[in-house]
């Protein structure tokens, strides 16, 4: 299911698993935030087709964190530059360090807790926060009971998000 958030921003949701992928068009670049799970692969490709895109047309992928339900379709996007937090992808040479990202509309907010390399993406002009698995609708917050979680960091990360001025929260999962 595709939901248009802004003229250049879409949310792509799936029947099979409740992760969200986001498509942004900025400066003639096609940007994805996360890629969903393997079970959502066909739906993801279909959704991109509906938006007149093929996987090869995606220029940049921004990873909110390294959990399988967000990463499993990365291999579809062979031409994309993939950015993520080095703490999330320590041994993956195909991931470019998020500190090297230069997209003026997008601010990187590092929010460890749910995993060591969680990142939120903030668009101050649009007042949009892509919150990955850190913060969900209705005030739900991400789990911090995974082996790699850093529960002691979560509160500090949530405080960082509280300081941001946003109207639209776009999380990595829907909440029933
Ligand atoms: Zn996660």
Image: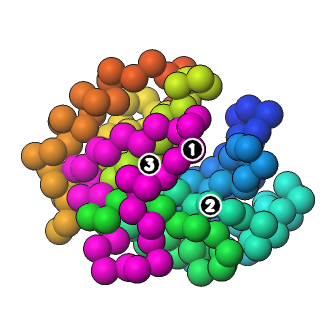
Residue 127 placement: quadrant = top right
Mark 1 lies on residue: 103
Dividing the picture into quarters, in which one does residue 134 lie? top left
Indicate whether 60 appears above or below 76.
above
Q: Nearer the viewer, mark 3 or mark 2?
A: 2
Closest to the observer: 3 or 75? 75
Between 50 and 13, which is closer to the camera in this rendering? 50
Dot label at residue 132 = 3
Q: Disc 3 or 2, which lies upstream in sequence?
A: 2
Q: Secondary structure at mark 1?
A: loop
- Residue 51 locus on image (x, y percent): 85, 55
Q: Ligand 1 closer than 8 Å to the CB at disc 1?
A: no
> Which is closer to the viewer, label 1 or label 2?
1
* Magenta region, residue range: 89-117
Q: Magenta part mainly helix, strand or loop?
A: loop
Snapshot colouring: rainbow
Q: Residues within 10 Å of mark 2 (few under 14, many from 20)?
A: some
User: Mark 2 and mark 3 in contact (Cβ < 8 Å)?
Assistant: no
Residue 60, labelled with which disc? 2
Q: Nearer the viewer's eye, disc 3 or disc 1?
A: 1
Do callouts 1 and 2 mark residues in contact (Cβ within 8 Å)?
yes
Residue at position x 89%, y 59% in the image: 52
Location of residue 62 with respect to 124 vertically, above or below? below
Q: Mark 2 or mark 1, which is nearer the start of the sequence?
A: 2
Q: Residue at x 81, y 69 (%)?
A: 54
Mark pair 3, 2: CA separation:
17 Å
Q: Is residue 95 left or right of residue 24?
A: left
């Amino acid at each position: 299911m595709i939901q248009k958030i802004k003229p250049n921003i879409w949310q792509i949701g799936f029947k099979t698993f409740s992760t969200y992928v986001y498509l942004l068009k900025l400066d003639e670049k096609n940007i994805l935030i996360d890629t969903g799970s393997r079970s959502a692969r066909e739906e993801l490709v279909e959704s991109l087709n509906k938006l007149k895109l093929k996987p090869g047309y995606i220029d940049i992928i921004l990873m909110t964190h390294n959990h399988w339900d967000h990463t499993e379709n990365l291999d579809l996007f062979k031409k994309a530059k993939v950015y993520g937090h080095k703490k999330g992808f320590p041994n993956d040479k195909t991931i470019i360090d998020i500190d090297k990202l230069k997209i003026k509309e997008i601010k990187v907010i590092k929010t460890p807790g749910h995993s060591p390399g969680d990142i939120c993406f903030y668009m101050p002009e649009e007042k949009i926060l892509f919150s990955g698995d850190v913060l969900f609708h209705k005030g739900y917050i991400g789990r911090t009971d995974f082996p790699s979680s850093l529960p002691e960091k979560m509160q500090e990360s949530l405080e960082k998000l509280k300081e941001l001025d946003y109207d639209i929260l776009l999380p990595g999962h829907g909440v029933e």
